[in-house]
Image: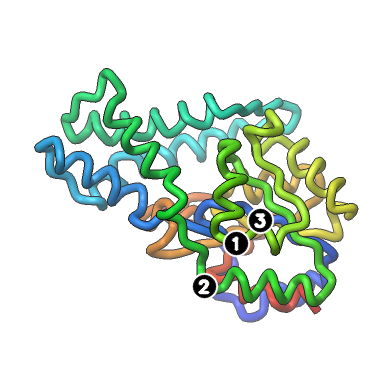
Amino acid sequence: MNNLDRANPFDGFGKVRAITLDMGWTLAYPSPGLWETLSDICNDVGRPRSAEACEAAAGALAIAAQQMAVARFDGARAYSDSDEKFRAGFRALSQTVFAQAGVDDEEGELFRRFFQLFNDIERWRVYPDVAPFLEAAREAGVRVGLISNAGTGLVETIRAVGLDRHLDVATISAAEGIRKPDRRIYALTLERLGVQPEEALHVGDFYLEDVVGPRQIGLRGVLIDRGANSLFPNFPQQDHHEDPDLHVIRSLDELRPVLS
């Protein structure tokens, strides 16, 4: 259960002093997407696989893993991160897809190709609602921060796509050594923004990292569903987590009420 279809779900929130946001599939996305890229690689090595099949190979497992992580979530646990750990996560994802397609990538050559394409700055696109919303936030005196589970190379991507001029703070997990849903990464970002948790709002596309995690410190979390341009378009997060207090949006424009 969630309030995706309710009218004006943020009327009771009041104006916030700061908004923090995730990066991938919240502010920007790769084009071609992950699944199209993996599909192209499978096709190139003679193991035809559609983008939808590539997503299905990883999607159900990802949802099941997240449901288990939510059920077992311990707010006292430390979640560490590094460039190596970030890369390893994508290696595991590609291995899942390649294995189901019958593709041998024991040497990791295909993964390296995939990861290079994923990190290609030229492929990243900012959603059309992002810049207008962030400009409106700045005009309203609302501070804006980024909290992303990502490698340190994200700094360059943020600059390349023009998001740096809209951000007051950018907290990147690999650079800090901690990742969402570790309570410390939200607290650190709010401290840098100079606001209290009850004065802020966090937006992201994963339930554990962007809703459950922020709630630990009293930071309200909002789930964003980017539809066809989501990471898992056929496995919407809100369909797999029972939460009557879950706020789901399709566009940042739906948050305009909290700016005024």
Q: Name above or below for residue 219 compared with residue 1.
A: above
Tell me where residue 192 appears, x and y as whole percent: 84, 47
Disc 2 target residue: 128
Q: Nearer the viewer, mark 2 or mark 1?
A: 1
Q: Name above or below for residue 124 compared with residue 114.
A: below
At horizontal 81% and vertical 76% (from top left) the residue drawn is 140
- Tell me the distance, in whole angstroms, between the alpha carbons under discs 2 and 1: 13 Å
Quarter of the image for the N terminus: give it.
bottom right
At horizontal 63% and vertical 76% (from top left) the residue drawn is 132
The amino acid type, in three-letter code, at marker 3 is: Leu
The answer to whether mark 2 and mark 1 are in CB contact below 8 A is: no
Disc 1 target residue: 162
Q: Which residue lies furthest to the left in this view?
A: 46
Name the quadrant containing residue 119: top left
Instruction: Give the structural element (helix, strand or loop) at label 1.
Output: loop
Tell me where residue 85 appears, x and y as whole percent: 53, 26
| Left-right relation of 254 to 116 | right
Disc 3 target residue: 21
